[in-house]
Amino acid sequence: NSIAFFAGYGLLRETVQRAEQMFPRELLIVRPRPVDIAALRFNISTLDDAAVQRIAGIQGVEFVAPQLSLKMPLRAEGDIMGQAATSDVVIVGVDPKLISKDVCGGFTFDYDPQTSLPIPCIIPRFFLDMYNLAYADSLGLPKISESYPLGKEFSLIIGETYLWGGTSSKSATLPCRIVGVTQQSPLMVGVLIPLGHARALNQWFTGRRALSYNAAYVKLGDLRAFDQVSSSIRTMGYVVES
């Protein structure tokens, strides 16, 4: 009985630790407040640098890490187990400190305008599961381990998509390198690149410097501040998730 108890306790503790890695309790997700009009959804609040600074000033907040989507047509080309692959892709820029633990040793995840290529990328573990459980099984291909993508490079084509082809007069092909895999559930939003890269690419493509973030991650310094911080952010006109 004692052996069974301690074995069960150890399994439970491991499960809780794994869950906390995927769903960090101290991490809040802040989004602009939406409104639905017929079949369309619009944001009625703006999440910009000024809002990020206001949230960062709330007592109990350790840091605020904004998330910026690339506002342009995108597709990716690469090689998986010797097979050429191309697909439309969602790319979002995040603050490097948000995923520092997910960067594999020997790699960096940051932005330097002088040495910005290849663009470092973090991919969600969900991508590997999709490949192993669906694509590989259906085509009879070998499954891949979590370490396989590390260091692999692919091309990011800006200005065109796989489904719709070329849709813009501006186009570029940029090399990207996978430097880590994340299991954090809030970050299962697409391929992650440093926030600095996202800002620079958006400015180059749109010609505008103004920033409007689609989300921000708020790290609490103390879980006891959860209710106070959440309430303060909601009064600013934003949606808070955890």
Image: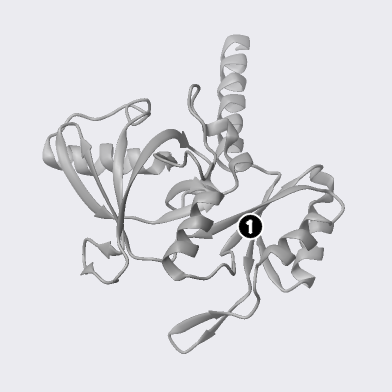
User: For the point 69% across and 70% down, which residue is it?
Assistant: 238
Q: Is residue 218 left or right of residue 210?
A: right
Q: Outermost residue toward the front?
A: 114
In this rendering, is residue 100 above or below 166? Answer: above
Between 57 and 211, which is closer to the camera in this rendering?
211
Vertical placement of residue 118 versus 202, above or below: above
Tell whether 44 sits left or right of 118: right
Q: Residues within 10 Å of mark 1 (few under 14, many from 20)?
A: many
Residue at (18, 38) in percent of width and height? 137
Horizontal and vertical percent position of residue 241: 64, 59
Q: Nearer the viewer, residue 63 or 199?
A: 199
- Write the residue at 50% across / 50% down: 197
Element under disc 1? strand
Q: Quadrant of residue 146?
A: top left
Q: Is residue 47 above or below residue 192?
A: below
Quadrant position of the N terminus in the picture: top right
Q: Residue furthest bottom?
A: 38
Q: Quadrant of residue 67?
A: bottom right
Q: Residue furthest right?
A: 59
Q: Residue at x 87, y 53 (%)?
A: 59
Badge 1 amino acid: Ala
Count of marks overlaid on the render: 1
Quadrant in the picture for the C terminus: bottom right
Q: Position of residue 53 (x, y in %)?
A: 76, 59
Q: How is the image coloured?
A: one colour
Q: Nearer the viewer, residue 159 or 6?
A: 159
Task: Tell which of 217 and 92 is nearer to you.
Answer: 92
Give the residue at the far top of this rendering. 3
User: From the viewer's perspective, is 84 left or right of 190?
Assistant: left
Q: Position of residue 192 (x, y in %)?
A: 47, 47
Q: How far across and down, in percent of the image, does residue 35 sit?
A: 58, 82
The residue that disc 1 covers is 216
